[in-house]
Image (cartoon, rainbow, N blue to C red):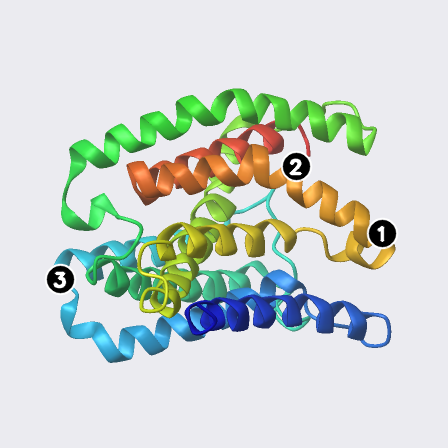
C-alpha cells in the first residue's frame, strides 16, 4: 500500500514545492507568475512525450495542432481586451506573445495528442475528424457554461467593486479564444495527460480522476499569486470556490464530452467577462 501511493505523494510534493518556493522567493526577488512556471513545465513535458511518441500521431493530429497554434499566434496580434502577462518579464509585445503562446499551444496539443493515442484521459474529437461529437461537446459546454458565465460577471462585479462597463462584443468573443484555448490545451489536455502517465502504473483505477483533479488544482490556484502572498488562507478558500464552480465543470466536460466541450465552457466565461469590462 505504501509503495502504491509513493508516486502520487512525490507528484503532490513536487506541485506544492513549485507554489511554496515561488511564494517564498517572491518576497525577495521578482519571480515569474505561477502560470508561467507551470506552462513551461507542462510544455517541456509535452515536448518530451512528443519526441518519444511522435510516430503515433496521425495526419489529422498535426493539422489540428498546427491550426490551433496558428489561430492563437495570429489572434494575439489583434487582441485588445485580453493581455497576457509579460512572459518571464521579457516578452511583452503582442507579436512576441503570439509567438510564445502559439508555440506553447502547438507543442502542448501535440503532446496531448500523443497521450490521447495511448488511451489518455481526454479525447480531442476534432483531431479524429469526429464532427458530430465535437459539435455536440461544444453545445453542451456552452449550455452549461452560460449560467456560470453570468454568475462570474456578478461575482467579479461584487469582489472588484466595479460597475459593468460594456465592451466591443466582437473583440470580446475573439479575445476569449486566447485563454479558452490555451489554458484548456495546456492544463486540461497536456498536463492532465502527463499526470496520468505518471500515475497510471501505480494507481491504474484511480489515475484518470486523480490526475485530472491535480491538473485542475494547479490551474485554479495559479490564479492567486498575489493573494497567496497577502493572505494564504483566503487564497486557499477562494481557490476551492473557483474549483467547485469553474474547475469541476470543465474537468467533467473534458472527460465526458471531449476537449472541445471544456474549451467552449472556458471560452464563454471569458467572453462574458470581457464583454462586461472585467
Residue 163 vertical position relative to residue 173 in the rendered view, above or below: above
- Element carrying mark 3: loop
Please tell me in which quadrant of the rendered image residue 84 appears: bottom right
Q: Which numbered marker is on residue 231?
A: 1
Contact, CB < 8 Å: mark 2 with mark 3? no
Q: Which numbered marker is on residue 241?
A: 2
Residue 103 vertical position relative to residue 255 in the rendered view, above or below: below
- Element carrying mark 2: helix
Judging depth in this view, the residue of 157 and 122 nearest the camera is: 122
Name the residue tied to disc 3.
58
Image location of residue 111, percent across then percent down: 32, 66
Image location of residue 122, percent across then percent down: 31, 50
- Label 1: few (<14), some (14–19) or many (≥20) C-alpha neighbours in 10 Å: few
The residue at 17%/32% (across/down) is 132
Would you say 103 lies left or right of 118 here?
A: right
Residue 219 visible in the picture: yes
The residue at 54%/46% (across/down) is 79
Q: Residue furthest front?
A: 1
Q: Which numbered marker is on residue 272?
A: none
- Give the Cα separation between the discs numbered 3 and 1: 47 Å
Q: How many marks?
A: 3
Would you say 189 lies left or right of 272 here?
A: left
Please tell me in which quadrant of the rendered image residue 32 appears: bottom right
- Element carrying mark 1: loop
Image location of residue 230, percent across then percent down: 86, 54
Contact, CB < 8 Å: mark 1 with mark 2? no
- Give the Cα separation between the discs numbered 2 and 3: 39 Å
- Label 2: few (<14), some (14–19) or many (≥20) C-alpha neighbours in 10 Å: few
Discs 2/3, front: 2
Image location of residue 229, percent across then percent down: 83, 59
* Quarter of the image that includes the N terminus: bottom left
Amino acid at each position: 500500500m505504501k509503495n502504491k501511493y509513493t508516486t502520487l505523494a512525490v507528484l503532490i510534493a513536487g506541485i506544492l514545492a513549485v507554489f511554496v518556493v515561488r511564494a517564498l522567493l517572491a518576497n525577495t526577488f521578482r519571480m515569474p507568475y505561477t502560470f508561467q512556471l507551470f506552462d513551461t513545465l507542462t510544455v517541456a513535458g509535452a515536448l518530451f512525450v512528443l519526441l518519444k511518441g511522435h510516430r503515433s500521431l496521425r495526419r489529422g493530429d498535426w493539422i489540428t495542432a498546427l491550426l490551433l497554434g496558428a489561430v492563437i499566434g495570429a489572434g494575439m496580434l489583434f487582441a485588445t481586451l485580453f493581455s497576457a502577462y509579460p512572459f518571464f518579464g521579457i516578452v511583452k509585445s503582442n507579436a512576441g506573445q503570439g509567438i510564445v503562446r502559439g508555440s506553447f499551444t502547438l507543442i502542448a496539443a501535440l503532446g496531448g495528442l500523443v497521450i490521447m493515442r495511448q488511451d489518455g484521459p481526454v479525447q480531442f474529437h476534432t483531431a479524429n475528424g469526429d464532427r458530430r461529437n465535437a459539435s455536440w461537446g461544444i453545445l453542451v459546454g456552452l449550455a452549461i457554461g452560460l449560467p456560470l458565465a453570468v454568475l462570474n460577471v456578478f461575482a467579479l462585479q461584487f469582489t472588484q467593486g466595479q460597475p459593468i462597463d460594456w465592451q466591443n462584443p466582437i473583440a470580446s468573443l475573439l479575445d476569449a479564444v486566447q485563454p479558452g484555448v490555451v489554458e484548456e490545451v495546456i492544463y486540461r489536455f497536456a498536463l492532465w495527460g502527463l499526470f496520468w502517465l505518471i500515475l497510471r502504473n501505480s494507481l491504474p483505477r484511480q489515475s484518470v480522476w486523480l490526475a485530472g483533479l491535480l491538473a485542475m488544482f494547479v490551474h485554479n490556484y495559479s490564479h492567486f499569486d498575489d493573494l497567496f502572498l497577502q493572505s494564504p488562507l483566503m487564497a486557499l478558500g477562494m481557490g476551492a470556490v473557483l474549483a467547485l464552480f469553474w474547475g469541476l465543470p470543465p474537468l467533467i466536460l473534458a472527460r465526458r464530452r471531449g476537449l472541445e466541450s471544456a474549451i467552449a465552457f472556458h471560452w464563454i466565461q471569458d467572453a462574458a467577462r470581457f464583454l462586461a469590462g472585467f
